[in-house]
Image: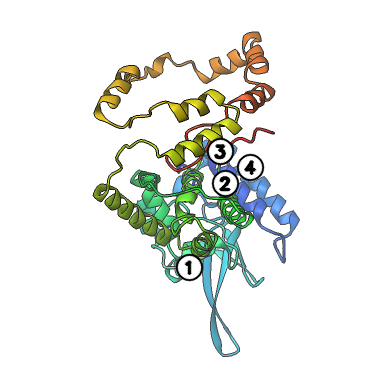
Amino acid sequence: MPVAVVSGGPVGPDAAIHLRRYTQITQRQLTRGLWTATAKLDQLERLKHYHADPASLRGEQDPHRYLGQRVANTFAKDKHTTLYEGTIIAHDEGIYGVTYDDGDWESDNADVIMPRIEKWLVETGQKHASARIQAGAPFALMLFREDSLESKAAMRGAFPFLASKHALGLSFELRDHQLPTSSDLTPEIQQCLGSALDKILHMCEGFPVESDEVFILRNFAITLPQLLFVYGTRTEQVRRAVDLFNQGKWEDLWKLANKAGERAKARAAKNPRRGKPKSDAKKDAYSQKCARAGNLSKAAATLYKISPPACNAETVERLRLLHPEGDLYYPKDSRPSTQQETDFWESEIGTNLLSDVFSVRNVGAYFRSASPIGAPDPDGCVGANTYHPSS
């Protein structure tokens, strides 16, 4: 019979990763019915005892590997057959405890529980356990609350989609597209972006810190602006994308962003940008901006100096001479070890550097006194978006 593997760490040699994962799963389950606080503490003690010796870990034969796994079962009630979902939350001497979303409890051996797992996989449109084992199966043992974002995303195959992008090295493919990812952040847009980010980061809490799941979700959180601005930067356009996000249609958003990026590339190729001098109106507006910021010399130079187009072959070659490419090979053997770095920062020299040069007060003073005029990133982000001068 196919069995499910533990996602979020190597199977076999690393008992600490498995213990941390099972402990998190146990602690997050709310006490109710037969799953009392005493039962939870008893299971935590059993986990510590079992994983105290790494040699006792039996890989795919580890009896705790199903903790956190979702199951499904059909029950007849009032002459109607209803499908109920639940979670395996306990194991003791070969018996697994399952709490169903409606509050019911079931306990039985692995031979009875395994068909419940397979039924859940079929009902949610996921692969069978044998196929998930061969694929590595990230997110295989996620915890789902009823009508949660995790449940909606899993039903639409969002997690296998993100895992496949990670496996192919395409987690950041959307960054290749020059799409707008900044706008006037109204309170509503800020709330939309913050809420989406909080939901992704909350999911990370269910996995070990160094697991593949956390790495994939963190990369997905970084690409959220590309997804939530896929229709545009206006409030109603962002709200439309957030609705798809909350429905778990992350793959649809990803595909829309890819299509929008391809269209932008086609428009750029058809009508490429060409350098040309600024108009008098733009010079006037920019000089006033510089003057209000206190850069009077720059404001004056903007008005009376000729600014020829800079984007040409001659300028590119001059920039290459000014900034020659260095050797891309970095001798990793010459890098100090982690212990050596720790010893340096704990030494007198390192402590003085942290207190005199890299202190929060000095960094804040630098940003408060630095010129507010700066070139934005390709996606439109400026320094003020990442650091507030008053902090």
**Callout 2: 10 Å neighbours few (<14), some, many (20+)?**
many
Q: Position of residue 60 (x, y in %)?
A: 45, 49
Sequence-earlier tag: 4 or 3: 3
Give the label, 4 or 2, closer to the camera.
2
Q: Give the CA distance from mark 4 to mark 2.
A: 12 Å
The residue that mark 2 highlights is 21
Residue tagged 3:
16
In space, the residues marked 4 and 3 are separated at their CA atoms by: 10 Å
Which badge, 1 or 3, is on the more N-terminal residue?
3
Total of numbered circles in the picture? 4
Residue 367's spot in the image, x, y percent?
62, 27
Name the residue rendered at 55%, 62% in the picture. Answer: 149
Query: Looking at numbered disc 1 in the image, what kind of residue is underneath it?
Result: Trp
> Could you tell me which quadrant the C terminus lies in?
top right
* Spatial separation of the CA atoms under disc 2 and disc 3: 9 Å
Look at the picture and state if 253 lies above or below 362: below
Residue denoted by label 1: 120
Q: Which residue is mark 4?
A: 48
Judge depth for marks 1 and 3 and give the one in front: 1
Compared to residue 148, the image places residue 388 above or below, namely above
How was this image coloured? rainbow
